[in-house]
């Protein structure tokens, strides 16, 4: 994790070993909390709490938020109640809610006991929302203004209440709790002191409801270039805001999840090196098992055509090439479509366009591959290796190749769209699953063409 | 692309057909520029310029930025010089630079002729930087303050110059051009009027140089939760800033690129449906060809063991299952490692930990798969289908399975790290490439074990 340069790391290590705590403190306070956290992650159980206590209150809380749950737990267990209260008081409420979700029950109890009643209430409010919903990633600490305020009054209000808010770059205007407008700090600064908020606010505010999926929320940030997005309840009452840094985390997390699902793994919650062997095993085994057992069908087909295969054994040596090419062609199409669906570039109504495009790409790719393969089989297999490949066998393999690419692209592009339509996650329809289907179909085609052309 | 609800879209279509331009204008000005752009993308060549002219100046420019290059070109070709100047004047300089990069030469000439000299200079400055560098995505419109200013003076300066800046949420403090501090608008607002900037600024500013890779820049945003990141030249002079919205776009783009590369495709610059068939064909064919031709090796191995295969033909029916399981196991490991590398969770120094983890996961998965497969082969193939599978054959297949999973996980996790180390893109080392290597190795193992145990 550590991204600081080697020189800084080795310096710190030397200072820790030499117990130069004053110097250490002087260095740490110049560093960004994320970098401090990265350095702290590499410390052992005794050094970590000692160094953590060197940090000033605010930096301590900010560093704490950036650390891995394991280290957070270690620190909390070592904290006195007063120390714990100091850290919890400095946390933003969405970070506090994340922490409460990650920690074991007895640690959670201690945290909630140290949080002041208002904070405890806000944490509980956030925890009520379903995982991966807008409500679960929002913060309830935002600045709200009244429509009739003047710019001067609004600025005073922000100065009075803004210190504890996660962002004041965008303020929201509410009337009896209902969201009626938004105002960037920029507009406020650039406006005349006696201007009235409702005259300078943006009245058409885009908002999401608490139950909105966090992936959609992240997409909206990237579409609209927001710094913050207001979250309302079903009656359009403003209950929180999602900030762009949380949206970025969600985006990264969702991309990782999609990539993992495409590769036939259950998505993991933590970074690779922080996931245990058993956890990784559990995430990977199911798909491997399913796909292995479903390969029974390919076995059955080969078995069924055993006589043909025995009569022309050379056919067997092209099976891996055919199934590999089919798998790769299908993966290309499915992954392109899955990503397009995730970024909302492709919708169900585009199905015909997608299929028509893939058909043309498939024909082009299939013909090129078949031509290249024909030349290769004649030159290498027939003329050089004399391994029983006749022009007829080459023809069988190359015709099959065209069909395989065609089938693979077609299955690859249409299955994810169908999955999306009926409410399944399209990412799960990626390579491994499609490869198996394509394998079965291409073997059937291969042996059928071989039987017909070679008279087996 | 359109994400607005059906009702709004059909209303707009009806209004366009009825030529109710005043009503249209009233609706459009309540909409977010991204949504207007989405609606406009679906218009035909004659309706688009007409509707675009309905928009007020600022909304027009903001909408223009959000449109696809094809539509932008169409609009520019229809613009009078005055109209073009109006749009160009409203653009932020980084968007203008993007536009200039996308348009054909004769359109670029017109754009640069309409830009005022200062803008033209800034566009050219940005275009000098290599593609995908921090310099190429930064904007040169930022607020810079002097260290000796008071808060009151700084606020005045921001009010005077801030209107044209892309963001004023973070201001930078420079001394003779050198970056010496950063100050959020929030701190400024919350500070006393007579406080001096250098006393309240954050003196430890994290910055990047103009040549830094844009992927690293995006990573820094997600690591440090920045709203903007200053870009300096080699002498630490502040030359521009990257804003979080551009970082988000880069992040999405880089995730898409990685996913495409992992699936054996050349990364595409545009959305799926905006890429032509030839372009897609060009992006996909190379890897398919390479992998098809490299499958020659698997063919050679099967050929080499043709006598053994003829003596025990049932062995051939398990080749697809073995190569499929190997491919899937390898993909899982490689994709997990590639993503870890991309997110900087894994570094070269972690190689031993990664390999040791994958070895244990491989042994666990291999044993489970082999056990399940042994049961399946005895029950289904031997007792039910009587297709010549003896317990000895089952043993050969299952032993091979354990080796295949082991080899696949080992190759899958180590190749991306090695690639990253020697400066290749690890994403290219993903599934297709590893599958081919694993195929060759597992066939060798399969036939060796079969020869030994079955005495072939």
Image: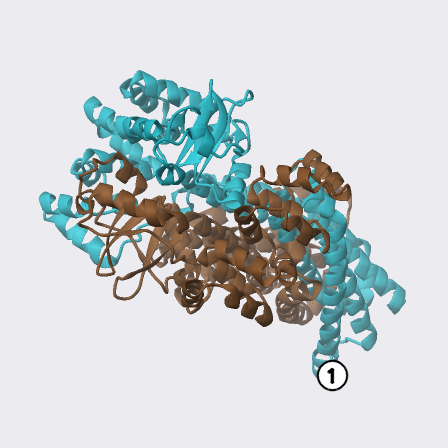
Chain colours: A brown, B cyan
Where residue A415 sits: x, y (%)?
47, 62
Report whether A158 appears left or right of B390.
left
**Is B357 situated above or below B67?**
below
Q: Secondary structure at mark 1?
A: helix
**Is B243 situated above or below B101?**
below
Q: Quadrant of residue A174?
A: bottom left
Q: Label 1: few (<14), some or many (≥20) within 10 Å?
A: some
Report whether B124 appears left or right of B383.
left
Report whether A69 appears left or right of A89.
right
Give the tally of numbered discs: 1
Residue at left 87%, top 63%?
Answer: B451
Q: Quadrant of the C terminus of chain B?
A: bottom right
In the picture as drawn, the residue positioned furthest to the bottom comes out as: B383
- Decide which of B439, A361 is in the foreground and name it: B439
In the picture as drawn, the residue positioned furthest to the top comes out as: B117
Q: Quadrant of residue A27?
A: top right
> Does the rendering let one see residue A93?
yes
What residue sits right under mark 1 in the picture? B383
Where residue A384 sits: x, y (%)?
76, 42
Q: Chain of mark 1?
A: B
Q: Quadrant of residue B349?
A: top right
Where residue A258 sits: x, y (%)?
52, 56
Residue at left 70%, top 36%?
Answer: A6
> Does the rendering let one see residue B91?
no
- Decide which of B196, B185 is in the foreground and name it: B196
Where residue B138 sits: x, y (%)?
44, 30
- Decide which of A256, B327 is in the foreground and name it: A256
Residue at left 30%, top 43%?
Answer: A184
């Amino acid at each position: 994790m550590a991204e600081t340069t080697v020189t800084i790391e080795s310096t710190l290590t030397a200072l820790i070993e030499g117990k130069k705590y004053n110097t250490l403190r002087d260095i740490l306070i110049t560093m960004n909390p994320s970098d401090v956290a990265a350095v702290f992650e590499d410390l052992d159980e005794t050094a970590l709490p000692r160094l953590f206590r060197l940090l000033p209150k605010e930096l301590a809380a900010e560093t704490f938020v950036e650390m891995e749950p394991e280290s957070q737990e270690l620190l909390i267990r070592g904290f006195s109640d007063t120390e714990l209260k100091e850290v919890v008081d400095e946390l933003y409420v969405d970070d506090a809610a994340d922490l409460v979700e990650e920690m074991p029950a007895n640690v959670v109890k201690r945290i909630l006991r140290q949080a002041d009643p208002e904070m405890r209430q806000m944490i509980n409010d956030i925890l009520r929302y379903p995982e991966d919903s807008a409500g679960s990633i929002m913060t309830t600490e935002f600045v709200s203004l009244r429509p009739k305020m003047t710019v001067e009054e609004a600025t005073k209000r922000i100065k009075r209440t803004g210190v504890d808010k996660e962002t004041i770059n965008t303020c929201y205007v509410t009337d009896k709790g209902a969201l009626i407008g938004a105002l960037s700090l920029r507009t406020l600064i650039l406006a005349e002191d006696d201007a009235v908020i409702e005259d300078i606010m943006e009245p058409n505010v885009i908002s999401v409801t608490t139950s909105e999926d966090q992936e959609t929320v992240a997409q909206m940030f990237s579409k609209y270039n927001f710094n913050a997005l207001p979250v309302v309840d079903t009656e359009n009452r403003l209950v929180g805001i999602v900030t762009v840094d949380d949206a970025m985390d969600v985006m990264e997390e969702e991309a990782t999840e999609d990539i993992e699902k495409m590769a036939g793994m259950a998505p993991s919650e933590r970074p690779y090196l922080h996931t245990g062997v058993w956890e990784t095993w559990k995430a990977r085994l199911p798909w491997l098992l399913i796909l292995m057992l479903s390969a029974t069908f390919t076995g059955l087909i080969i078995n069924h055509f055993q006589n043909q295969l025995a009569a022309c054994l050379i056919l067997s040596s092209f099976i891996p090439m055919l199934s590999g090419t089919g798998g790769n062609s299908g993966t290309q199409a499915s992954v392109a479509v899955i990503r397009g669906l995730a970024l909302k570039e492709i919708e169900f109504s585009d199905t015909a366009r997608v299929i028509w495009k893939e058909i043309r790409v498939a024909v082009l790719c299939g013909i090129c591959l078949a031509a290249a393969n024909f030349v290769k089989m004649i030159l290498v297999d027939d003329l050089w290796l004399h391994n029983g490949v006749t022009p007829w066998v080459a023809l069988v393999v190359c015709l099959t190749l065209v069909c395989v690419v065609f089938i693979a692209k077609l299955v690859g592009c249409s299955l994810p769209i169908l999955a999306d339509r009926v409410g399944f996650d399209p990412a799960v329809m990626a390579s491994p699953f499609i490869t198996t289907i394509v394998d079965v179909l291409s073997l059937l085609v291969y042996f059928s063409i071989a039987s017909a052309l070679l008279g087996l």
